[in-house]
Amino acid sequence: MSNTTKGFIASFIFLLFSIQLAPKLGALFLAIAPIVYLVYLFKKGVKFKSYSKNVKNIISVLLIGLTLSGIGGILTEFGVSSNKTKQIATSKSDNIEENKSKEDKNSVKNEKDKEKKVEKNVTAVNSNELGELKVHFINVGQADSILIEQNNHSMLIDTGNNADSNKIKSYLDNQGITSLDYIIGTHPHEDHIGGMDYIINCFKVGKIYLPKTTANTATFRDLASAIKNKGMQATAPIPGDSFKLGNATCTILAPNNSNYKNLNDWSIVLRINFGNNSFLFTGDAEAISEMEMVKKGLDLKADLLKVGHHGSNSSTCANFLEKVSPKYAVISVGKENSYGHPGNSTMNRLKNKGVKVYRTDENGTVIATSDGKYINFNCNPGTYSAGDNKLKVDKPQEPVAKPSNSTKSSSNNNVVSKPAPKVAPAPVQSQNNEQTVYVTRTGSKYHSGGCQYLRKSQIPMKKSDAISQGYSPCSKCRP
């Protein structure tokens, strides 16, 4: 065997190992070695030259075939490598995109979680910052007295009858009250301002609100003296004005007139906003004042309504109640009172609206506590039962004097004095007290016979009796 043939065989064996171990190198060697060997045979292959033409052609075809096979291998290997590189690159790109997408999702989720935590923290902080608003509807029988506390600030709306002075002071003392930011006398009836002179004398007071009207009574005169002796002046309410009680905002809604014939309609009406909760305090405001607020389009919506005029049928009219739309109502009313409060019509309206009613004649002192979101009570709701419908006016009507000039307060001299006994106002007399007049079962006026307001119900009585029971003359028939 010639050296050339041995070299060819060795090259072929090397080629086989190369293809197995290194496909790219083997393909390259397969493409180059056969053609180089063929050239060598034609130029220097002595024995090859002695072969017949057919043998030479066969060997040449085989070697050329091997070369072409190698070229094909090169193309295949490098093509596969390119595809694999692309696949790897694509795979890496996909992985990067997938990881980026996951990271983005995780980032968004984390941001949302952070936002939720921040919202929760803000809510908690806001709740903690607000504190609590406590509203005490003090049980003073057939009268009103409401203590409102918020973060060491306090306000007293009305002070019951004269006889309630010590009771109210003791209640304030028990709550740790040493000063009052505001005192509001809703209107000058004794069952609302009776103990106010005593409270003013006993406590440091920031500001006093009274409607711009007076009453010719000893109770009102005592109040005026207490304010003067304190070196203060009462502030007249202006609808739309607001002031702060801690974190609560108080807005004055009424009175909206200066020509009321009934002192009840002079009542200061106050709306308090605390967080998401709202409260409406109406004094003894009756339908005339209520409808003025409705027609003016005032924001009357409230979670809790202090029912006007002890639940009388003359207050809490349907249109007003519709605008307020309360969840809860509180009635300050005396047990088995002689006025028939609360009225049947009022209680039916509250019942039909599904309003939960709390009342001092059944529950005693009612305390409503708000955290700015929810309102809780110290007792269960009362009933919808009405009072005894006795033939008596809601309360004796004290004469309404012309509006007074009230200005803002300035100083706080803390003078304490024992409540002075009050003298009840004498009823207005007429030259002809034996005249027969007529009243109705639900009205507060007395009429001459044939008055258009008598309609079906007309009960005769002496004019002196009508006056002594608190009825006032009809402005239409002027008996």
Image: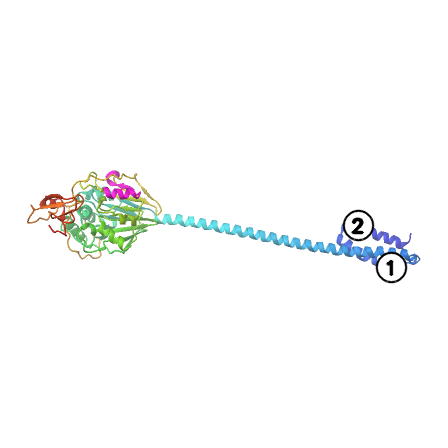
- Residue at the (48%, 50%) spot, across then down: 112
* One can see residue 350 in this view: yes
Q: 462 or 369, which is in the foreground?
A: 462
Q: Identify the magenta region.
A: 344-363
Q: 111 or 344, which is in the foreground?
A: 344
The circle on residue 40 is 1
Q: Quadrant of residue 74?
A: bottom right
The circle on residue 163 is none
- Residue annotated with mark 2: 17
Q: Amino acid at mark 2?
A: Phe
Q: Amino acid at mark 1?
A: Tyr
The answer to if 257 sits in the magenta stretch is no
- Residue at the (58%, 51%) spot, across then down: 98
Label 1 sits on a secondary structure element that is helix
Left or right for 13, reference 185: right
Q: How many residues crowd mark 2 within 10 Å: few (<14), some (14–19), many (20+)?
A: few
Q: Main secondary structure of the magenta part?
A: helix
Question: From mark 2 to mark 1, how far is it between C-alphas?
Answer: 23 Å
* One can see residue 268 in this view: no
Counting from the top left corner in percent of width and height, residue 11 is at 83, 53
Counting from the top left corner in percent of width and height, residue 50 is at 93, 57
Label 2 sits on a secondary structure element that is helix
Left or right for 442, reference 123: left
Counting from the top left corner in percent of width and height, residue 45 is at 90, 58
**Color style of the picture:** rainbow
The answer to if 351 sits in the magenta stretch is yes
Q: 401 or 345, which is in the foreground?
A: 345
- Indicate which disc, 2 or 1, sits on the residue closer to the N terminus: 2
Left or right for 125, reference 421: right
Q: Quadrant of residue 387?
A: top left
How many numbered circles are shown? 2
